[in-house]
Image: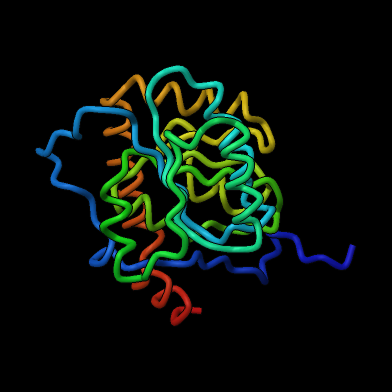
Amino acid sequence: SHWVRPDDPRVAIVPLGSDPERFWPTDEGEDPPAGPLRILFAGLLRHYKGVDVLLQALTRIERPVTLTVAGAGPESSRLQTLCQRLRLNDRVTFLGRVADMDLAALYRAHDLFVLPAVSPAEAFGQVLVEAMLSGLPCITTELGTGTSFVVQEAVTGSVVAPRSPEALAAAIDSLAKDPALRRRLGQAGRARALEHFTTARMLADVSAL
């Protein structure tokens, strides 16, 4: 094969980083508001993001949850039509494109972040890093790319099979019923992001190379 193996000694991996002074958690002493679990997806609305799978997963969850979809893209109208067909309009809000200056507050206004990507076109998941820096537990999918490196199964969130509304619904439901688990995963995610996924760490590693 002409592809370079990840363990080739000539290869050094430097993960992308984000700014921990821009993305930070809500006050740890602050209780989450009563009401449904607040789920967030943020990103371009393209086919490989798997938002359709997330919508299908919501129909399998009986406990109260809401979903905010932040982003625009070529799948927007199709996803909104699917949302109507699945009768989820009272549980799902499509925000369209969100200004960069409003992203940090958007993460803090939610309880759980989900990136349900279905294709290796999702190579890393920068939004996962932003969510982890914001103290959110994350659910993503195993694609053989960086998503399951960023999010660690049962440590900072959940990693499930792609294209499976059933697996995604089960992961969401398990976190929806356990606030203490969400808090623990969110704290571990923040710690992991501070260690591996900051802009300063990325620049230092590139400089060292």
Q: Is residue 96 above or below residue 34?
A: below
Q: Check the picture and name the quadrant holding the N terminus.
A: bottom right
Q: Is residue 204 above or below residue 147?
A: below
The image's colouring method is rainbow
Q: Is residue 93 above or below residue 96?
A: above
Q: Residue at x 23, y 50 (%)?
A: 25
Q: Is residue 103 above or below residue 67?
A: below
Q: Quadrant of residue 146?
A: bottom right
Between 125 and 68, the residue placed more toward the observer is 68
Pinpoint residue 185: horizontal percent, then vertical percent.
34, 35
Between 34 and 185, the residue placed more toward the observer is 34
Between 146 and 110, the residue placed more toward the observer is 110
Q: Is residue 9 left or right of residue 98?
A: right
Pinpoint residue 198: horizontal percent, then vertical percent.
36, 65
Furthest toward the left, the residue is 29
Q: Quick check: can you spot residue 127?
A: no
Pinpoint residue 112: horizontal percent, then vertical percent.
38, 39
Q: Quick check: can you spot residue 147?
A: yes
Q: Residue at x 69, y 53 (%)?
A: 47
Q: Is residue 28 left or right of residue 104?
A: left
Pinpoint residue 108: horizontal percent, then vertical percent.
26, 50
Q: Residue at x 32, y 39 (%)?
A: 111
Q: Residue at x 28, y 26 (%)?
A: 179
Furthest toward the bottom, the residue is 207
Q: Quadrant of residue 90?
A: top left
Q: Is residue 12 left or right of residue 47?
A: left
Total number of numbered discs in the rendering: 0
